[in-house]
Image (spheres, grey):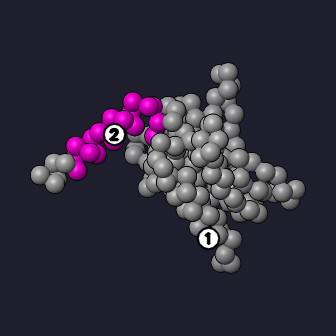
Amino acid sequence: MRALRATLLALTAMVALAACGGYESESGLPADTQKALIDQGRIREGENVLFYTSRGEDIAEAGAFFTETRVAAYWLVDGDDEDISIDLKDITALQLKNNDDSWTHADYVTVTWGPDNQKTKVFLQSDGEDFPEHFYEALKKQWEKTRAPA
């Protein structure tokens, strides 16, 4: 009975996620999603995506992710592609902004990078309550790993 209940809960969660068009992963990507993102030019062949969110959109329209070597985000604005990609080794600071009290409720990570300390926001619109914090903590850990002396 417990196994049936767990299965039904998992199926309900998958249907709810599919209904909103969004996709999130804290443990890599399924092969079909990986291929779609490679075909779109969002990720490179052989790149290992550690965390990914489509920010509540279809994966063709928006997403934020990080790999062993970079953090990236993309979205469509009036049919035009907008995207960012920052090598982890170029990052000088990371900060999570929790926006539960704002009207958008979109948490984001401020990425400070480059010699001029440019700032970029990586938005983590999510249906998962803890996903933004998990994304941030895992990104921070991966970033610190790239900064450690070899």
Residue indicated by mark 2: 14
Q: Residue at x 22, y 50 (%)?
A: 6
Which span of residues is magenta-colored? 6-23
Q: Amino acid at mark 2?
A: Met
Q: Is residue 142 visible?
A: no
147 sits left or right of 119 in the view: left
Residue indicated by mark 1: 145
Q: Is residue 127 above or below residue 136?
A: above
Q: Is residue 137 above or below residue 73?
A: below
Q: Main secondary structure of the magenta part?
A: helix
Indicate the secondary structure of the residue bearing disc 2.
Answer: helix
Instruction: Provide residue 72's location: percent of width, then percent of height.
Output: 64, 47
Depth order, front residue of 50/32: 50
Q: Quadrant of residue 144?
A: bottom right
Instruction: Provide residue 148's location: percent of width, then percent of height.
Output: 66, 75
Q: Quadrant of the C terminus?
A: bottom right
Q: Quadrant of residue 83?
A: top right
Question: Separation of disc 2 and disc 1 at Cα?
Answer: 33 Å
